[in-house]
Image (spheres, rainbow, N blue to C red):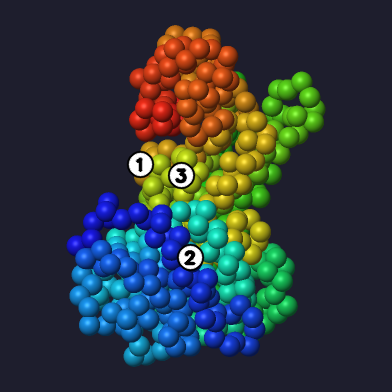
């Protein structure tokens, strides 16, 4: 078996992208309808083979060319595969042709590194799930390389999303039980206002009462046929239902504001979830005072940034939560220093909490259908968790960087309401343990994901010995984690 440690994953990701660029596009009615795909196979003996889409025959998938045409007689048990596009899922190919995901599992490939998800929302992430369910370890390409792949495939991605409403619904495994019919419901349970908002944002010409609009919702998986009726799917009810919690008790967003005087205000956002983010923001704008600052323009900048971060966090919570955890709901909690968003379920495998904390997590959706609808409503980035924009917006407004943590069963996102908020929290958590100068140092660290001793020393204007003493103290208090060795040593921010 090829040991992952014996290969250089980054080098092989780059090689797969180079092979991708040599793909042969088959003639299509519109430019960009077929993807560029490259695949690299590392065999148990260490030899490497490659294939691009259409390399040997027009339209052949890269994985098919690699496994069936170039290595059909080879034993590939324990091999490692790198491919720039998610392998097609069962049901994606015309019967009886097996999908690429099925071929990979049958070949006993040990690990696969996937560039980006297949953007067609009817098959999105199902290939990855099939591989995971059949014992194949799945990794994702580094985020910067994912963006290169997406850039090279802009036409394909756009066309895949365009043709989705007119596509024949593909069959295959479900990522969630909410893809099926919602029990005890019918189309009258949908909110007309929510459907009209979706129709306008997605620029759908068909009226919401028309058969064409209903067919579109069926093809998108928002309606389902059950016996002789057409009823909402679980996700359709969640997004557009007047009262989704009557059927799906885990739906909704629970809001709580803790005011400085000890009082609190509660608000539940349990109607159509397409409205929940903006309803929550309207509530926050009405209830939260401007941050204290000398400049009126600066106050507006901080509030604008805070509300943008809050919107991103709320949408992420609704889109990426694990709806299989029925006893937990998304929560929004505000304190004088923070705005905290809790989302049931940990990071979707293979994304890790550490990648979220460092804003380097690759792009992947737990619930692609929800992501698709929120993206059409311009409430979510096209892919991923919006991490780059969250980091950039906080930095521009000179706010402490948002922090991710895990509080079983919740993934917790903490947003800081002011530049001083992170310092207040760490001072309260470590009463008397930090000097005034260390608190100044923490204010600097809270705006970063990590820092070196030299960067810390230069910012505070202290010598290396003092900087090292501070950083060691922060590590002892559980606020930093030391990574690397010698000159490569850095300190990752993990608290408060």
What is the secondary structure assignment of the residue under circle 2? helix
What is the secondary structure assignment of the residue under circle 3? helix
**Relative side of 40 to 390, left or right:** left
**Relative side of 341 to 300, left or right:** left
> Residues under labels 3 and 1: Cα distance?
16 Å
Whole-percent x, y for residue 346 in the image = 38, 48
Residue drawn at point x = 37 percent, y = 56 percent: 9
Whole-percent x, y for residue 386 in the image = 57, 50
Judging depth in this view, the residue of 372 and 248 nearest the camera is 372
> Residues under labels 1 and 2: Cα distance?
38 Å
Q: Are there few (<14), some (14-19), or many (20+) residues within 10 Å of tag 2?
A: many
> Residues under labels 2 and 3: Cα distance?
24 Å
Q: Are there few (<14), some (14-19), or many (20+) residues within 10 Å of tag 1?
A: few
The quarter of the picture where the C terminus appears is top left
Judging depth in this view, the residue of 416 and 26 nearest the camera is 26
**Relative side of 21 to 483, left or right:** right
Reading the chain from its start, which is encountered first: label 3 or label 1?
A: 3
Name the residue carrying label 1. 408
Looking at the image, how many numbered discs can be counted on the residues?
3
User: What mark, if any, has residue 356 been given in the picture?
Assistant: 3
Reading the chain from its start, which is encountered first: label 2 or label 3?
A: 2
The quarter of the picture where the N terminus appears is bottom left
C-beta proximity under 8 Å, tags 2 and 3: no
- Rendered position, 267 above or below 431: below
Q: Which mark is in front, 3 or 1?
A: 3
Residue drawn at point x = 37 percent, y = 27 percent: 486
Judging depth in this view, the residue of 44 and 414 nearest the camera is 44
Name the residue carrying label 2. 17
Reading the chain from its start, which is encountered first: label 1 or label 2?
A: 2
Residue drawn at point x = 40 percent, y = 16 percent: 473
């Amino acid at each position: 078996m090829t040991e992952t440690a014996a290969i250089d994953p980054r080098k092989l990701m780059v090689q797969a992208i180079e092979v991708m660029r040599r793909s042969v596009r088959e003639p299509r009615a519109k430019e960009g309808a077929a993807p560029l795909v490259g695949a690299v196979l590392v065999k148990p003996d260490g030899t490497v083979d490659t294939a691009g889409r259409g390399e040997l025959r027009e339209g052949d998938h890269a994985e098919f060319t690699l496994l069936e045409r170039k290595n059909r007689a080879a034993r590939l048990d324990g091999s490692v595969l790198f491919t720039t596009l998610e392998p097609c899922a069962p049901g994606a190919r015309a019967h009886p042709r097996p999908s690429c995901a099925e071929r990979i599992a049958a070949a006993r490939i040990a690990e696969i590194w996937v560039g980006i998800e297949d953007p067609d929302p009817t098959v999105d992430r199902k290939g990855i799930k099939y591989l995971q369910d059949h014992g194949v370890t799945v990794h994702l390409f580094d985020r910067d390389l994912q963006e290169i792949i997406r850039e090279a495939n802009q036409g394909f991605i756009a066309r895949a999303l365009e043709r989705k409403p007119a596509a024949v619904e593909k069959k295959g495994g479900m990522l969630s039980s909410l893809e099926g019919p919602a029990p005890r419901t019918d189309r009258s349970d949908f909110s007309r206002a929510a459907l009209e908002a979706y129709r306008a944002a997605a620029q759908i010409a068909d009226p919401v009462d028309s058969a064409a609009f209903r067919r579109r919702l069926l093809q998108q998986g928002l309606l389902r046929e059950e016996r002789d009726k057409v009823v909402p799917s679980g996700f359709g009810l969640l997004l557009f239902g007047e009262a989704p919690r009557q059927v799906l008790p885990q739906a909704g967003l629970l809001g709580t504001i803790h005011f400085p005087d000890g009082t609190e205000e509660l608000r539940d956002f349990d109607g159509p979830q397409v409205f929940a983010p903006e309803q929550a923001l309207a509530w926050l704008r009405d209830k939260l005072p401007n941050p204290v600052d000398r400049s009126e323009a600066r106050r507006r900048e901080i509030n604008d940034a805070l509300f943008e971060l809050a919107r991103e966090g709320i949408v992420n919570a609704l889109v990426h939560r694990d709806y299989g955890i029925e006893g937990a709901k998304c929560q929004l909690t505000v304190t004088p220093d923070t705005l905290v968003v809790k989302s049931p379920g940990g990071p979707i495998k293979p994304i890790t909490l550490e990648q979220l904390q460092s804003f380097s997590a690759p792009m992947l959706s737990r619930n692609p259908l929800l992501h698709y609808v929120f993206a059409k409503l311009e409430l979510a980035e096209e892919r991923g968790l919006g991490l780059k924009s969250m980091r950039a917006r906080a930095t521009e407004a000179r706010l402490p960087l948002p922090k991710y943590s895990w509080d079983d069963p919740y993934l917790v996102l903490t947003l800081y309401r002011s530049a001083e908020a992170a310092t207040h929290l760490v001072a309260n958590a470590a009463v008397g343990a930090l000097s005034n100068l260390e608190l100044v140092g923490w204010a600097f660290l809270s705006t970063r994901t990590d820092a070196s001793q030299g960067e810390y020393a230069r910012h505070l204007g202290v010598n290396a010995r003092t900087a090292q003493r501070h950083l060691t103290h922060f590590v002892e208090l559980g606020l930093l984690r030391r990574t690397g060795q010698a000159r490569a040593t850095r300190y990752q921010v993990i608290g408060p």
